[in-house]
Image (spheres, rainbow, N blue to C red):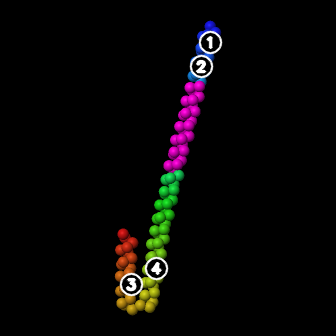
Amino acid sequence: MAKGGKQIQEQAATVQRNAQEFAETMSTLIKAKNQEIFNKLENQERESIELLVIQKTKIEHEVKTSETVAEQTETLFKQGTSAEIAQLGKSVDAFFQDSGE
């Protein structure tokens, strides 16, 4: 009976080792998957911020261009002749064509 008891103890130890190795493997896989998810999230966050910065810069440029056209319009109306006003009209048309593209 001692031999049978020893064999059961060895089998139990093997099962425990296998269970522990399985648990460690699963834990490692879960940690790796979590890290992968966090990395993807960080990449998406960075890309979104970069896109917002690009859009902000573009809008700021469009606002500055609009302000310049408005200032030129005001100056021409204050000082201008009808020929200068006609030229301004062409500039405004060109601006809006460029903005639409």
Residue 31: assigned label: none
User: Which quadrant, please, contains the C terminus?
Assistant: bottom left
SS at badge 1:
helix
Mark 1 is surrounded, within 10 Å at the Cα level, by few (under 14), some (14 to 19) or many (20 or more) other residues, namely few
Instruction: Give the labeled residue for mark 2.
Output: 12
Q: Earlier in the sequence, mark 2 or mark 1?
A: 1
Q: Position of residue 54 (x, y in %)?
A: 47, 64
What's the distance in space between the residues labelled 2 and 1, CA to CA?
10 Å
Instruction: Give the residue drawn at x 62%, y 12%.
Output: 5
Q: CA distance from mark 2 to mark 4?
A: 83 Å
Report the magenta residues as a range. Answer: 17-41
Q: Residue at x 39, y 84 (%)?
A: 88
**Residue 2 appears in which quarter of the rendering?**
top right
Q: CA distance from mark 3 to mark 4?
A: 12 Å
**Quadrant in which the N terminus is drawn:** top right
The outermost residue toward the right is 2
Q: Which mark is residue 5?
A: 1
**Residue 46 drawn at (x, y percent):** 51, 56
Residue where numbered disc 4 is placed: 68
Image quadrant assignment for residue 92: bottom left
Mark 2 is surrounded, within 10 Å at the Cα level, by few (under 14), some (14 to 19) or many (20 or more) other residues, namely few
Q: Are marks 4 and 1 in contact (CB under 8 Å)?
A: no
| Residue type at the position of mark 2 | Ala
Q: Is residue 30 magenta?
A: yes
Say which residue appears at 35% left-offset and 82% top-offset. Answer: 90
Task: Tell me the amino acid under the disc marked 3.
Answer: Leu
Q: Nearer the viewer, mark 4 or mark 1?
A: 1
- Point out the tag, 2 or 4, that comes first from the N-terminus: 2
Q: Which residue is mark 3?
A: 88
Q: Residue furthest top?
A: 1
Distance in Å between CA atoms under marks 3 and 2: 92 Å
